Image (cartoon, helix red, strand yellow):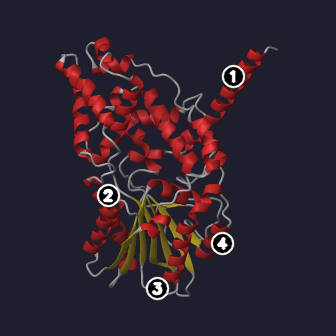
Amino acid sequence: MTLVRRILIAAASLFLAITSVSGQGTIDPALMEALKADPTRAATNHRPYEHGDLRDTPPPAGYKPFYISHYGRHGSRHSWGGSYYELIIGALSKADSLGILTPEGRAVLEQTRKVDAAWDGMDGRLSQRGVREHSQIARRMVKRFPAVFRGTPRLRAVSSTVQRCIISMNAFTTAVTSERPRAQWYLDTGERIMDYVGETGHSAKACRERTNAILNNIFDAPCDSTLLLKRLFSDPEAGRALIPSLRRFHKALFRTAGISGCWDIEDHIFPVLQPEYIYRYYSYDCHYIVSRYGNCTESGTARFDSLSLLVSDIVNKADEAIAGGEYCADLRFGHDYPLMTLVSFLGIEGPGSKLDFDQIDSRWMGWKELCMGSNLQMIFYRNRKGHVLVKFLYQEQERQLRRLESVQGPYYDWEVVKANIRGYKR
């Protein structure tokens, strides 16, 4: 066998191994239908907040809520940089001046101009929708667990040093105070707080090495641009000449569409993109998030060691409250990737489910599991004997812990949870 033939066979074997592991050789029919039914779901972690089922399973007899431990991602925000908007606006404005822009193309141009104006040169800027999201989450929390906030409640809230998180904290705490005017607050932010509120473990070398080769091959299939050009331009050939890089233009359209909902801007971009393209880009984003920050089998669990500060903060403050501490709630405001790593560490079913890489398309719905404003609430209950149970809410919906037996329904013995954290069955 010649050297060239051996190289070709090895390359083919590597390609087959990558496509087999990545699960990208086929399209998951259920996911494709879900994205076709609502293409804005493809925004994944850029999608505005959507809470889950708010119904509560009754606790065991004699148990009442007395303390809440919380981690919330900031609300809806903008993305970074204006180069994508410049690319779209430049090409479509020129086409409009030449009289070759279709009505669909004009709608795309107008939407992009609105997104660009909302960005206004301020990367990661929290939108007013993001403010509303946290205000509404807070109001629902107070009304859902009134026993926690009775009398003159004292609450502690800390934030990432990033402005969108601080403003989210402000929206949340202001809403609680509007419901409970006698509330007293301890508020803080700073570098030491950022050490645990913003930690993800994503820089772990082992994690990068295991996922980079796969991730780099997920989105290498070329896109058929014929349909897109026909939708945007009455003269597709002339329109194509206005676009320096069609691949980058596609990406610019996808990212602009995905962030529009955060600003309550009606979407006209997703409908002009091919469903297969939307699927692949959504799939890439989900694989990136789960393999880098989630509970992905191939990535291992070494990066979860970085969660020690955040988990210790949660455990220590909960034990402080149980021992008679002054605060009825501890609220933390941070970012999506630390939250993703936290729920994966704790084994919260749904966002933190343990998945093989090729299960992600079929089992991890990014628009539900890591949207803007995503939040974990740990609700602590106690009976007259002082025994403590804890219930986990994610997106305000009751969730089970992976491979851990509950006392009843979604209610877990706090001491069992703590012991489990030390050697978690991830």
Q: CA distance from mark 3 to mark 4?
A: 22 Å
Q: CA distance from mark 1 to mark 2?
A: 49 Å
Q: Which quarter of the figure has residue 268?
A: top left
Q: In the image, what residue occupies the spot 38% across and 56% down?
A: 373
Q: CA distance from mark 1 to mark 3?
A: 62 Å
Residue 204 drawn at (x, y percent) = 60, 52
Q: Residues within 10 Å of mark 1 (few under 14, many from 20)?
A: few
Q: In the image, what residue occupies the spot 55% across and 65% down?
A: 410
Lower position in the chain sequence, tag 1 or tag 3: 1
Report the disc number at residue 419: 4
Q: Are marks 3 and 4 in contact (CB under 8 Å)?
A: no
Q: Residues within 10 Å of mark 2 (few under 14, many from 20)?
A: many
Of the residues shown, which amino acid type is indicated by label 2?
A: Glu
Q: Quadrant of the C terminus?
A: bottom right
Q: Are marks 1 and 3 in contact (CB under 8 Å)?
A: no
Q: In the image, what residue occupies the spot 38% across and 63% down?
A: 161
Residue located beneath label 3 in the image: 325
User: Which element carries disc 1, helix, strand or loop?
Assistant: helix
Report the disc number at residue 133: 2
Residue located beneath label 1 in the image: 12
Residue 346 drawn at (x, y percent) = 58, 62
Of the residues shown, which amino acid type is indicated by label 3?
A: Gly
Say if residue 287 shows up in the picture. Answer: yes
Q: CA distance from mark 2 to mark 4?
A: 34 Å
Residue 155, above or below 137: below
